Image: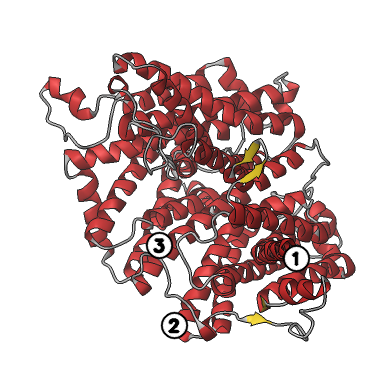
Amino acid sequence: MQKMPKWADIVLIPLINLFLAFIISGFVIWSIGKDPFAALNTMIEGAFGSTNGWGYTLYYTTNFIFTGLAVAVAFQARQFNIGGEGQAAIGGLGVALMCLMIDWPHWALALPVAIVGGAVFGAAWAFIPAYLQAKRGSHIVITTIMFNFIAAALLGFLLNGALKAPGMAAESPGFPEGATLPTFHDMLAPLGIEFSRHAPANISFLVALLCAFLVWILIWHTRLGYAIRSYGRSETAAKYAGISPTKIIIVSMLISGGLAGLMAVNVTMGEAERLVLNSVEGAGFIGIAVALMGRSHPVGVVLAALLFGFLYQGGAELSLWEGIPRELVIVIQALVILFTGALDNMVRNPVERMFLKLRKGA
Amino acid sequence: MENLDTIIQILDSTIRLATPLLFACLAGLFSERAGVFDIGLEGKMLAAAFMAASVAAVTGNVWLGMFAGIGISLILALIHGLASITFRGDQLISGVAINFLAAGLTVVVGQSWFRLGGRTPALSGEGRFGQIDLPFADALRDVPLLGPIYSDLLSGHTFLAYIALLAVPASWFVLYRTRFGLRLRAVGENPGAVDTAGISVVKLRFSAVIICGVLCGLAGAYLSTGHGAGFGKDMTAGRGFIALAALIFAKWRPWQALGTCMLFGLLQAVAIRYQSINLGEFTVPVQFMDALPYILTVVILAGFVGKAIPPKAGGEAYVKER
């Protein structure tokens, strides 16, 4: 017998967790002498009050869908991929190499190649930790953390050397004109919809939604997805059913790394139009919060990514108008991870007991 | 003699850079030996560095700063204990959360307190740990070879640096020569057996987490009031993870932890001094030096050069049998 109805597990508990995280964040805002409700108002206004705000919110959302899906796919196989940061950074290298390879005549040609570049490079960066976990039993959390630092060093080396554009900044040369992705402004103008010209949201958002759909098909409607879920639920049962742990660990981590790498399409082609140092800006880690919040399901991930997109854009507005540092968003992110991930049982146990009592009473 | 001077300078800065790593590494050692994985070393250090520098800046007393640093680190350690021991949550996720909590709060609160963009005011005088000169350091300086080693390399570090060095034999003694240490190691390998013997697994693990909090507090206080003169945003810069790497490299043993932290400290010292190193035809880029601790750790984790085997029950919450 289930301890509580499914909707309570999927909707109620995450909402209570989120509520707790928001209460404490509000307390933090109050304790530094600001008004939490005014702050919330500023965030909502800044993130959803204009097409410019929407453009930034959806731009961040795009990043977090990719990294959230990356963490979620690995979670399904009970692998904790904390290396999204590094995989996205190396994915950026793949995207940049593809974009700089030839003078692309049109973005429609550049995009598929860049997608392959980002995914392959991201997956390759996830391969070594995956292989070491599967074959040598090296803990994947530790190795992926180490690979984040190694990726940062590698990019620092390349962007100060072989890939460096002339000038002071550690960045690659600008991508050719034909590798610039259409923004929402470009896409919506032919339909007669006015959208802010300066907002960075671009066609990668649609790629992200497509990826979420493909992940859903993969995990719940294919033989491989079934194997991944079985392995994630019970290693011994999966082994007994003839599923190879080595294969599942490596394949799920390759998909995970590939998804993280795709994030680079959004930030390098869609926004900076070159590869810059630290282009990932913590999005790889936010993927952890997004996947936990979204219960590792693509629909949940997309919604949670939108929430964090809102928090990021709203947070930028907070620092602009209310004098609250952007880092407040990191605090909220930490609290969401803490409550949905680590302190989950603190909420779950009382809620389960409540449902049991209700059932007895009925 | 110029070469000797250079070597002594590099080794001297090795000790300075290894001190926070050593504190954090020993912190992780206690926690993980008791079966509680801790990837939140970085966050606890960062929060401690911030509080130590803030309190030292306001009161002008470095000791108050140090205790404040230990205090905040303890609070975070207890949150980790609550999540991973009491509520049996995922220890790794809890560690991640604590790292972000510290990274965010130090800047938000720091900006609100001092309005210096996340920094704390620069410390001077009583607000910092001063150098301690060992006895006869001046008199012995002119003795060939041993003089400079004693007077310039071993003498002249801060109080906390010596404490860190003393913490190594102390940790070894506690872990391998006391009943508490035996139980602590047992609870990381086989908590069921410890429970059967009538000893509380929860209490032991909480003690380990508390020791971890104190040591991380010292690591952070050293960074902002001993090594540096004030707190800067994200000033730990991955040291908590290097310490974690050192812990694995040392295979969860105290003396080896000393050796590894010194090695990683040396790598940092060389990287800071030389930027890139010329080996005739080939230049070693500074980024490679930065990445070397992580690469070495992956190699040792892969088990191609000696195998690092973590405590058996690490990362798992203990559920009492009924």
Q: Is residue A315 above or below residue A206?
A: below
Residue A82 in view: no
Q: Chain for mark 1?
A: B
Check the image and name the residue furthest to the front: B1
Identify the residue at horizontal 33%, vertical 31% (top origin). A273
**Count of numbered circles on the image:** 3
| Quadrant placement of the N terminus of chain B | bottom right
Secondary structure, mark 2, is helix
Mark 1, residue position: B1
Secondary structure, mark 3, is helix
Q: Mark 1 and mark 2 in contact (Cβ < 8 Å)?
A: no
Check the image and name the residue furthest to the left: A192
Instruction: For marks 1 and 3, give the CA distance.
Output: 60 Å
Q: Mark 3 and mark 2 in contact (Cβ < 8 Å)?
A: no
Mark 2, residue position: B58
Identify the residue at horizontal 30%, vertical 45% (top origin). A310
- Label 3, residues with CA under 10 Å away: few <14, some 14-19, many ≥20: some
Q: Indicate the quadrant where residue B287 lies.
A: top right
A43 relative to A110 in the view: left or right: left
Q: Nearer the viewer, residue A13 or A210?
A: A210
Mark 3, residue position: A24
